[in-house]
Image (cartoon, rainbow, N blue to C red):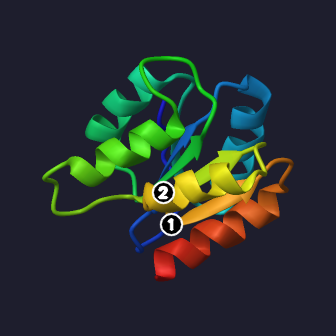
Amino acid sequence: MVEQAAVGSRKARRVLIVEDDEDTRRLLKIALRSRDFLVDDAGDADLAWQKIVDFLPDVVLLDVMIPGGMDGIGICERLNRTDSPVRPKVIVISGKTGDEDLERGRRAQADAYILKPFSPLQMIETIDWVLKE
């Protein structure tokens, strides 16, 4: 469920969290809402794609290993193939540290790649960074 953030006169930045671990989603939602982000979330790939279409996020936080029809990198690749004039920024989240995994994220044109474990502050700083790009 999307909850409004108290953002005054500036446009709220919209973040979609795609993560199958409910505790991680909850922690990120609390941290992001405390910084006036408008937040929605999905626990699997199928729901994630629907929320991307309906919620129109500025940033998508994509866990690589999620259940559903595709993984997080697959969602990123699909975003790059859409005809939408505005593509959300994508931050890939992964516990995989191998060169092959990092290269796959780069080839999918992810805007950033964060390794687990990470802190909520690190995620907020990364979101701020990709939105300034």
- Residue 57 to residue 110: above or below: above
Q: Which mark is residue 90?
A: 2
Examine the image and state in which quarter residue 53 appears. Answer: top left
Q: Nearer the viewer, residue 100 or 48?
A: 100
On screen, residue 39 versus residue 99, left or right, reads: left
**Mark 2 crowdedness (10 Å alpha carbons): few <14, some 14-19, many ≥20:** many
Contact (Cβ within 8 Å) of mark 2 with mark 1:
yes
- For image coordinates 73% across by 26% down, the residue present is 21
Q: Nearer the viewer, residue 1 or 127?
A: 127
Helix, strand or loop at label 1? It is loop
Q: Looking at the picture, how far across and down is residue 63, in whole percent?
A: 62, 39
Q: CA distance from mark 2 to mark 1?
A: 5 Å
Q: Report the residue marked by disc 1.
A: 111
In this rendering, the count of numbered labels is: 2
* N-terminal label among 2 and 1: 2
On screen, residue 27 versus residue 10, left or right, reads: right
Q: Is residue 7 visible?
A: yes
Q: Amino acid at mark 1?
A: Asp
- Residue 9 to residue 20: above or below: below
On screen, residue 49 versus residue 101, left or right, reads: left
Q: Which mark is residue 57?
A: none
